[in-house]
Amino acid sequence: MAQLLLVEDDTAIRGALIRALSERGHAVSSAPAAMTALQHVVDTPPDLVLLDLGLPDLSGYEVLRMMRAVSKVPVVVITARDDEKEIVRVLNAGADDYLVKPFGPGQLDARIRAVLRRSGPAEWKGSSPIVVGGLALDLDAHEATLDGSSLDLSRREFDLLHYLAVHSGQVVTRRDLLTHVWRTPYGGADKTVDVHLSWLRRKLGETAQEPRYLHTIRGVGIKLVAP
Ligand code: CA
């Protein structure tokens, strides 16, 4: 299930889109203005942002530039005007796709899924399970097992383990993790990564002093390897 952030100031349109997208299996949160949307992207990064260009506080172009300064989250722009110039401007500013109102919910859903397939994590691409030693990650079911026992991971812990497993055998830096797991290369703190890594370690039944899968490479980052 994708976590979407809908940024739209029109209450009626917002309600209709939330209903239509929820019915199609997405989890939708919403923001009525640009500044609350930017705050939301930093605090609880969504998988994709649906951004109406006609917002009360900032132009679509300005929102995109500010969003791109803190996040790589895919953005689908919704525009009321068939304004070629504005569409080109927002695409150049980092939007991934756009829709001109009015559009049907089927088309919107198809665009969202296409953008997620292109730019989202591998879990949207329906790939096969990832296996590293006794660790297996089923991306479709969003489930991880260790030696056949299910691991009770939060969404973030799963994404973190997923990224490390995809790059198993390689040293991954905290910056890599902030960029790809938190999607906030400039906004996050290394401390956040460390805290989540320690939770993940505990759930894997190991410690930093006696690692099995998660090895800290001092001053560089972290490496996941089969024990
Ligand atoms: Ca609007």
Image: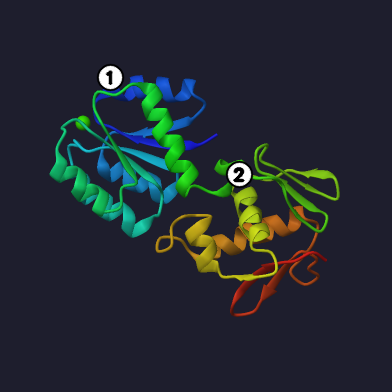
201 or 6, which is in the foreground? Answer: 6
The quadrant where residue 101 appears: top left
| Nearest to N terminus: mark 1 or mark 2 | 1
Q: Residue at x 85, y 45 (%)?
A: 148
- Residue 27 location (% of width, % of height): 49, 31
Q: How is the protein colored in the picture?
A: rainbow
- Is residue 47 something one can see in this rendering? no
Q: Is residue 124 left or right of residue 65?
A: right
Crowding at dot 2, Cα within 10 Å, few <14 / some 14-19 / many 20+, comes out as: few
Measured Cα–Cα span from mark 1 to mark 2: 31 Å
Q: Which residue is identified by label 1?
A: 12
Q: Residue at x 77, y 72 (%)?
A: 209
Q: SS for tag 2?
A: helix
Q: Quadrant of the N terminus?
A: top right
173 or 86, which is in the foreground? Answer: 86
- Residue 117 location (% of width, % of height): 49, 43
- Residue 214 location (% of width, % of height): 72, 65
Q: Which residue is identified by label 2?
A: 155
Q: Residue at x 61, y 41 (%)?
A: 126
Q: Amino acid at mark 1?
A: Ala
